[in-house]
Image (spheres, helix red, strand yellow):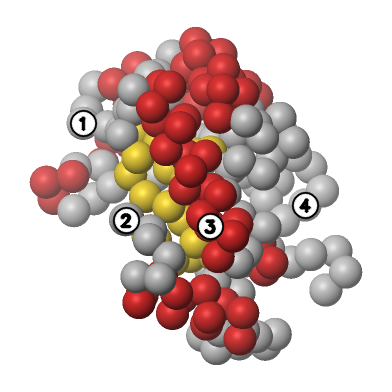
Amino acid sequence: MLCPQSANTALDAPMLNVAIDTAIEGAQPSGNKVCIIDAGGDDVGATALGRFSKLIKQGDHAVLYVVNGLRELTKQPQEAADLLPEMEFTSHLSATHVVNNTHLMDATDESVVARGIDFAEEVTRILGLPLVCTAVPLATEAGSESLLTPAAQQLKESIDSGKLTCENCYFVSIYVKKPWD
């Protein structure tokens, strides 16, 4: 993992590690080497990513547009779709797929996931891009990285059993230390 020197500080600036050049050049999907760059979800991150666009375009690549229907500026599918062209222009890269990441962190439940799926499907329809997956955060008990909270266990069981339809569901853990923790 490469991250800015400002990681784990209060500084929030669009700085990408210069070692990313080497990581991009070394990425070879056929050789199981993949480089994933999370540039954030705004034009500031897209500007930082634009520095690497020529190098990225030289190889096989995918640009995933991650949407969250519960963010302040993208509560409607059209709003999320309207943000993409500016980020594409600024990054000099075109999105190839959409990832649904609609969640409320530890408070994510079946209704949040279902709402997010509907949201993401409409975004993909508007943009004409395929949906790769729906990320579903599973909260864990305090002090444990593997013991799910009862609510997270219920959410996982609803998806695993088919009670809640979630094609290409991708379960994730969120590692964010909240200021009050």
Report the Cα–Cα distance between label 4 and label 2.
Answer: 34 Å
Q: Which residue is mark 4?
A: 9
Between 13 and 79, the one lying in front of the other is 79
Secondary structure under the numbered disc 3 in the rendered image: helix
Q: Position of residue 26 (x, y in %)?
A: 26, 41
- Residue sitting at x 32%, y 56%: 167
Q: Tag 3 or tag 4, which sits nearer the N-term?
A: 4
Q: Amino acid at mark 2?
A: Asn
- Residue sitting at x 47%, y 39%: 120
Report the Cα–Cα distance between label 1 and label 4.
Answer: 33 Å
Q: Amino acid at mark 4?
A: Thr
In the image, farthest residue toward the top: 89
Labels 2 and 3 touching (C-beta < 8 A) = no
Q: Which residue is mark 1?
A: 60
Q: Tag 2 or tag 4, which sits nearer the N-term?
A: 4
Disc ID at residue 113:
3
Q: Which residue is mark 2?
A: 168
Q: Is residue 126 left or right of residue 25?
A: right
- Residue sitting at x 63%, y 64%: 108
